[in-house]
Amino acid sequence: MQRDQRRESDPGTLASVPPTSPRPSGLRTRLRALVREIGKFSAVGSIAFAIDLLIYNLLLNTGSETLTAKTISTIVATTLAFFGNRYWTWRHGDHTHLARQYTTFFVLNAIGLGIALACLAISHYVLGDIWPALRSQAADNVAGLLVGTALGTIFRFWSYRKFVFRAADVPPRDPAYSPPSP
């Protein structure tokens, strides 16, 4: 019996190791939170894109003029993206002045669109004068939809996070982290 008690209290045995999980490093916690944030941002953006496409095509099929249909579908999709990002992606952010936040969001979204259009214009009109192959539909899709949308999306993520949905004073807790018991 004394031998069994000694094993349990011996610092070299597994029985003496307290049942605590290691605390994740600060960098690892921030990376997890950033990946989660990017995932939510991407999900909201994908849904908004699908809604934009759906409404645009529905309006075209009902006889709406092209620019009117695109304007309406863009406003609806941008509004949906605003509320999705406000109440899901950055729900822990500072949520004061709804009108100011929405206006800033819309302006930054327009700048993101401008980035995509600039990529397309540079490829098609500037570089297309040098290499005519860059005036093709395939090159326009690569420049506008792939490169432009990617750069515009990076800008949107950064700017929404920085200017629209600023983090509140208290950072959100990592749900995967549980503090060790005393």
Image: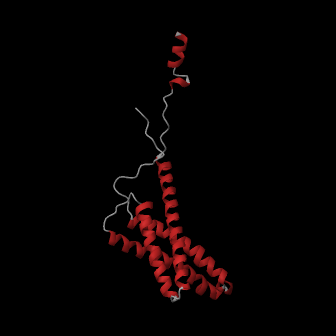
Q: Residue furthest top?
A: 2
* Residue 72: percent from left, percent from top: 46, 81
* Residue 54: percent from left, percent from top: 54, 76
Q: Measuring 39% from the left and 64% from the top, which residue is drawn there? A: 165
Q: Depth check: 137 or 135 in front? A: 137
Q: Residue furthest front?
A: 62
Q: In which quarter of the view is residue 79 placed?
A: bottom left
Q: Measuring 53% from the left and 86% from the top, which residue is drawn there? A: 62
Is residue 170 shown left or right of residue 65?
left
* Residue 51: percent from left, percent from top: 52, 73
Q: Measuring 52% from the left and 10% from the top, which residue is drawn there? A: 2
Q: Quadrant of the C terminus?
A: top left
Q: Depth check: 129 or 83 in front? A: 83
Q: Depth check: 8 or 82 in front? A: 82
Q: Is 154 placed above or below 16 here?
A: below
Is residue 8 shown left or right of residue 97?
right
* Residue 145: percent from left, percent from top: 59, 76
